[in-house]
Image (spheres, rainbow, N blue to C red):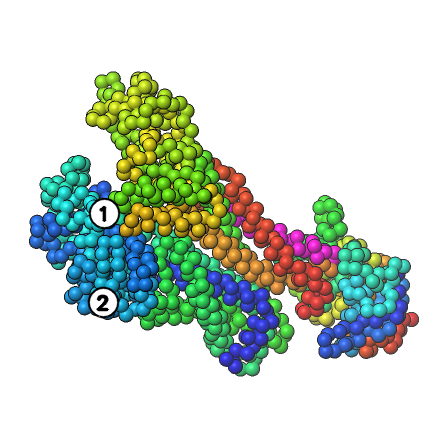
Amino acid sequence: MKGFKTYFTFLGRNKLFTFINVAGLTVSFMFILLLADMVTRQLTVDSHVKDADRIYVFATSGGVWGHYQLGLKFQDRYPEIEDWCAYGDCHQLPYEMENGNETLVATSFVKKNFLEFFSYDLIEGNPEEALVSNNNIVVTRSAALKLFGTEHVMGMSVNTAIGQFVVNGIIDDIDNSIFPSEIEIFMPIENYKYYNRGADIDDTHLGNAGSAVVFFKMAKGFDPATRADDMTSFAREFWWIFQYNKNTKVNMIPMRDFYFSEIGMFNYLNRYDFTKVIMFMIAGIIILLMAVSNYVSMSVAQTGYRAKEMATRRLLGSSRGSIFWRMIMESLLLTVVAFAIGLLLARLVEPYAMDLLGVELDVVGDFTWLTALCWTAFVLLLSFASGFVPASVLSGYNPLDVVKGTFRRKTKMVYLRVLNVVQSGMTITLLACSIYFGLQIHGVLTAPLGYDYGDVLVYNRTTNNSLDAFCDEVKKLPFVTNVSLTCGTPDNGGNNNTMKVTSGDSSVVFSFQTFVCDSAFLKIFNIKLNESRKLASSDNAWYISDKALADYKRLGYGTDRFVADGRHANFDIAGTFKDFKIRSMLSKETHPLRIQLLPSDSIKYPWQVLVEVNGGDLASHKQQIDDMYLSMTHSPMLVSEWYADQVRDTYRDVINMNQIVFIFTCVALLVSLLGLIAMNIYMISQRKRDIAVRKVFGSTAAGEQRRLMRFSLQSIVIGLVFAIPLSVIGMRKIYEFVPFGSLSRWWVPLAAFAIVAVVSLVSVYFISRNATNENPINNIKTE
Amino acid sequence: MIKIENLSKVFRTSEVETIALNDVSLEIADKEFVSIMGPSGCGKSTLLNILGLLDNPTSGHYYLSGKDVGGLKERERTNVRKGNIGFVFQSFNLIDELNVVENVELPLTYLHISARERKQRVADILSRMGISHRAKHYPQQLSGGQQQRVAIARAVVSNPELILADEPTGNLDSKNGKEVMQLLSDLNSSGTTIVMVTHSQRDAGYASRIINLFDGQIVSSISEM
């Protein structure tokens, strides 16, 4: 370190240079570390699973369907199936611990061979015995601590609504897998029927066709695609989903491909969009390149300050090579410091990044010898790449310069100018996209839905018991204003009823989204009836939306009764209501809707209970109603959420993407600004004498500042020229992603330009202030 | 034209205090050619900087054409300097990115003179300096002598009353040095006041008066007989 004394002195004297270089590289490293961990994880999901290349997820052409019986039947039929496994969904179930307290634990129902099938090792317990009995459970390390306060919980028991369970295996927390990391307990799938009747493993009708995901391990060399037709014919023999839709075909998806597939499914398994992975990789590389460019620019900009030292070293006997390597070592030192701080920062922002990217991350935990080696090589390479240009420039100084006293060396500004133009253009583009994205999201979230809502809690029905007692009790709470039983909400779109209506000589498909509810539903969502014929509530009287009525009248029918083909298809039109938007604002079409209003006690199988509360401490209200729901309905689990959160969840993908674009924009703006600062420091250091000469001959400090700002503005204007087409392309892509509002917001790139220009000009103003205010004789004397 | 009274200039750092000029009084008449001589560090350039309104004295008075300009602010100094004082430096101080015409034109742009007049005045002065044939060349394409001619052209293009020259021949060979001194002498003959700092006894001989400085004080002021 002693050999770096002059370097440390230089860094100490040039604090802005040091700060900008370290800050730029640090922020870039933070991003690179997070993105590299994210990308590596995405590409190594379930890499621990043995024979994963022989495991297939059962799916049809329409999505991932499955039932325990499916596995049994297929294994009997196809000898190529070596083994199979079934995974039920993950549910929050209440567990009673020894102290009598109850807590919700994420429980997944799995076939008893699950751990062996997916190569999960037990921390404690005998793999041969784990989950063997129906009342066994295997817990994760976190669940053990959560339930019992210790990791050593073998043989301990917990009580649930369906009986007592004994822990006979402990595994590490699930990580980097298609199986959710939230899972805390694995329970034999034999118990699933107590929570989901259609998932009964003995149900030979495979009633709940989406109750499980079935995995098949095929014999070596067997490709199930070659037998897909036969499998389809076989499935059609016993499974209703193949019988109802003749187009349904078996589509086995290799487990390795499943993570990046987009096929629809009913159970939650982790998946990711491969395009996003590529996008983040590219973003990471761009940010890194910008940071390296800045480092090079800054270092070249500062060469003038170190030229004397290097020329003197050469005069005193140092070789060109030793100076070159000295500079590379200095670059390495700075890069290592930036890497270390970047690692700390990455660790700090990891939770936020996980939420934003929708993936698990563990930057430090994922370090292995191999990754450490890769990072070391990366840092070395980066140090060399960053240090090469300044090292070449400085080692090229002639010792004669010391004798002559001529250290000033002018290099072309073209490189910095081009860099600045490119960075400005990229920043304007990103900012324009970010602004447009933000406007789109704001538009979506604030657009009139055709209905209103306040603080509404949605309880998904999770029990077969009556909900009447709960409804009666919850209404008595002083902060509850309305309680409704319903089948469907505007956000989930209700049920679909498609029927055929005769029109002339042909029949037309008429598709309703249907809501069966009580009158409180209308109050909670402020849905106004346009017209009510005061028909008695019955299974045969429905209110229909304006759109539905208009479509129906267009077919040549009256307004009293809806007549369609098939049983139960005809009904009386009880009245009409204004159209409202179901599901997402992003779906352009206005769907025909119908609502059946029934007294609460006539809605025998409601999907949801809606509880509207009147402000106040919402968290406390929710806790109180949750407790009441569990105790009064005797439900084995709880699914409750604020309606507003459900609406936001509908747009989670686009909101997250918007935040990611915004963050990248901020980073690009920051890095671009650092580049601009580098260029200006360089330019000013090169032009100090020129500024002095101009001032001697009549120019003023303000005039010189204006000249430098004009120079920067030129770069941004040139950047705008190629930012406009790029912005238009970006905005079109965003519009495809968020098809809402207007595409032609021509002012957005100009607003982005204005922001970048103001930020840049303000920074140039401050950077150049000292140089332009300096007494000109100081810089004329130096020659 | 120039009158300074009890002028001092002190440079202070946190550790040392250097007296560059110590109670200097001096008068320079209109159309006079004065050489300032003395050893390195005696305060020649400091005096020239103050005379050129590039720096303010620490104490004392400086009258330029009868107006006290010793305590002016930066902007006011610039306004007085513009068009009234021309500078010639030892190392020429031409701007590398500008060609000969643009370099010479520079002072005129700050005087907001129209483009047509600027063009005419630059052409005239280049012709007078004998470097019209180099009008489109850049400084690095010129010899030292030619560069100094351009620098002198730049100094006189705005017709200043006063030219300050800091060792104008310091970077030139004897032939070019002689030509430059002849140019300055011609300018003086045509009515321009010239104050020149020099180490050269021969160059000083072109002046009508030689002032010797030592340790920030005037030790002699000898007029040519």
Q: Please state the extent of the stretch shown in magenta in the rendering.
A: A697-722
Q: Position of residue A319 (x, y in %)?
A: 50, 79
Is A702 a magenta residue? yes
- Residue ID at (72%, 51%): B109
Type of the residue with mark 2: Gly
Q: Nearer the viewer, residue A126 or A442?
A: A126
Q: Secondary structure at mark 2?
A: loop
**Image check: A760 left or right of A779?**
left
Please tell me in which quadrant of the rendered image residue A691 appears: bottom right
Q: Residues within 10 Å of mark 2 (few under 14, many from 20)?
A: few
Type of the residue with mark 1: Asn
- Residue ID at (49%, 38%): A745
The chain that hosts pointer 1 is: A
- Which residue bears the numbered disc 1? A196
Q: Position of residue A288 (x, y in %)?
A: 44, 60
Is A704 a magenta residue? yes
- Which residue bears the numbered disc 2? A155
**Image check: A261 left or right of B30?**
left
State which mark lies toward you, 1 or 2: 2
**Can the viewer see residue A481 in this picture?**
yes
